[in-house]
């Protein structure tokens, strides 16, 4: 299977990578839906509730207590998967990364064209004056981070009850629809609308790198169950 994947990559100059939480687990960032993921841990409130727009608006301090503790990992470093994808982009083979992750590790590895469907913990903005702040505005503050204008600083991440950014969606859909190879990695493909983006693919080869079965397996030309960092690290020179 590795040889097959290497051949597909070698023969294409129009690859798009679509990834989920499984891409970052090898960097020490836990996913949400696995046995030991966030959704199976016990908190004062369910994580789905804490990470909603309405909870952010009504219980901002509780939101930030959880967010700082569980959603930010400043010590995480790009793994072999992130590095391999950045290398493919530098070679002119990979045209875009479309990610459901909010950790900024693709950019940290050197990827330039990244569509972050769910935003990024690296970016934050004042809800009042719209001034942008980096991650230190959250990590180096306590309680509710405030702007110099007095407004509340909000992470530039898509919370439950919020819609995806139109420009990001359009860019991701366009990249996927133009690709001739789509590599899908580290995602259960159960989260919509993101999973629906795969329906825009019109190319020739679909590669699926995921530890467990997905609804998309039957449509894939290559399915590999090994860790993504191991797979991409091996086949990308």
Image (cartoon, grey):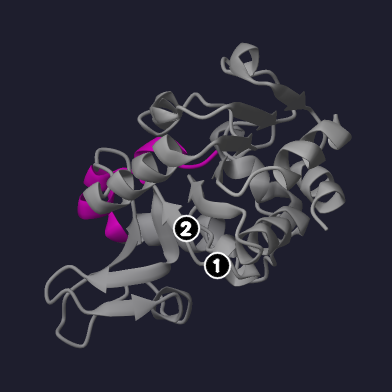
The location of residue 27, given as percent across then percent down, is: 72, 57
Q: Is residue 57 above or below residue 68?
A: above
Helix, strand or loop at mark 2: strand
Q: Residue 125 versus residue 170: which sits nearer the camera?
A: 170
Marks 2 and 1, how far apart at CA = 7 Å
Residue 78 is one of the magenta-drawn residues? no
Q: Residue 113 versus residue 137: which sits nearer the camera?
A: 113
**What residue lies at 46% left-to-right and 55% top-to-bottom?**
66
Residue 54 is one of the magenta-drawn residues? yes
**What residue lies at 66% left-to-right and 41% top-to-bottom?**
22
Residue 195: quarter of image: top left
**What residue lies at 51% left-to-right and 67% top-to-bottom?**
112
Residue 76: quarter of image: bottom right
The location of residue 159, given as percent across then percent down, is: 33, 46
Taking 14 as reference, is 137 left or right? Answer: left
Q: Are marks 2 and 1 in contact (CB under 8 Å)?
A: yes
The location of residue 86, given as percent across then percent down, is: 64, 62
Of the image marks 2 and 1, the number of the one nearer the N terminus: 1
The location of residue 206, given as percent across then percent down, is: 61, 28
Q: Is residue 45 visible?
A: no
Residue 87: quarter of image: bottom right
Taking 211 as reference, is 125 left or right? Answer: left
Which residue bears the numbered disc 2? 114
Q: Which residues are magenta?
A: 42-60
Which residue bears the numbered disc 1? 107
Q: Please tell me the numbered disc located at residue 69.
A: none
Taking 5 as reference, is 155 left or right? Answer: left
- Callout 2 crowding tier (Cα within 10 Å): few <14, some 14–19, many ≥20: some
Q: Is residue 63 visible?
A: yes
């Amino acid at each position: 299977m590795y040889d097959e994947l290497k051949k597909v990559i070698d023969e294409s100059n129009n690859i798009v990578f679509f990834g989920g939480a499984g891409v970052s687990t090898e960097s020490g960032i836990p996913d949400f839906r696995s046995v030991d993921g966030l959704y199976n841990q016990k908190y004062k409130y369910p994580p789905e509730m804490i990470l909603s727009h309405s909870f952010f608006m009504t219980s901002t301090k509780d939101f930030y207590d959880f967010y700082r503790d569980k959603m930010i990992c400043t010590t995480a470093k790009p793994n072999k998967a992130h590095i391999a994808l950045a290398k493919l982009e530098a070679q002119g083979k990979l045209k875009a990364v479309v990610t459901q992750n909010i950790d900024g590790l693709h950019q940290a590895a050197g990827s330039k064209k990244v569509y972050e469907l769910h935003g990024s913990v690296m970016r934050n903005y004042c809800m009042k004056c719209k001034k942008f702040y980096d991650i230190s505005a959250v990590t180096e503050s306590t309680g509710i981070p405030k702007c110099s204008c007095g407004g509340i600083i909000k992470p530039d991440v898509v919370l439950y009850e919020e819609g995806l950014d139109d420009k990001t969606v359009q860019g991701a859909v366009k990249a996927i629809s133009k690709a001739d190879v789509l590599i899908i990695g580290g995602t259960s493909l159960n989260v919509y609308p993101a999973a629906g983006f795969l329906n825009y693919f019109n190319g020739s080869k679909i590669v699926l790198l995921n530890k467990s079965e997905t609804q998309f397996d039957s449509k894939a030309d290559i399915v590999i169950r090994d860790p993504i960092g191991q797979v991409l690290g091996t086949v990308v020179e």
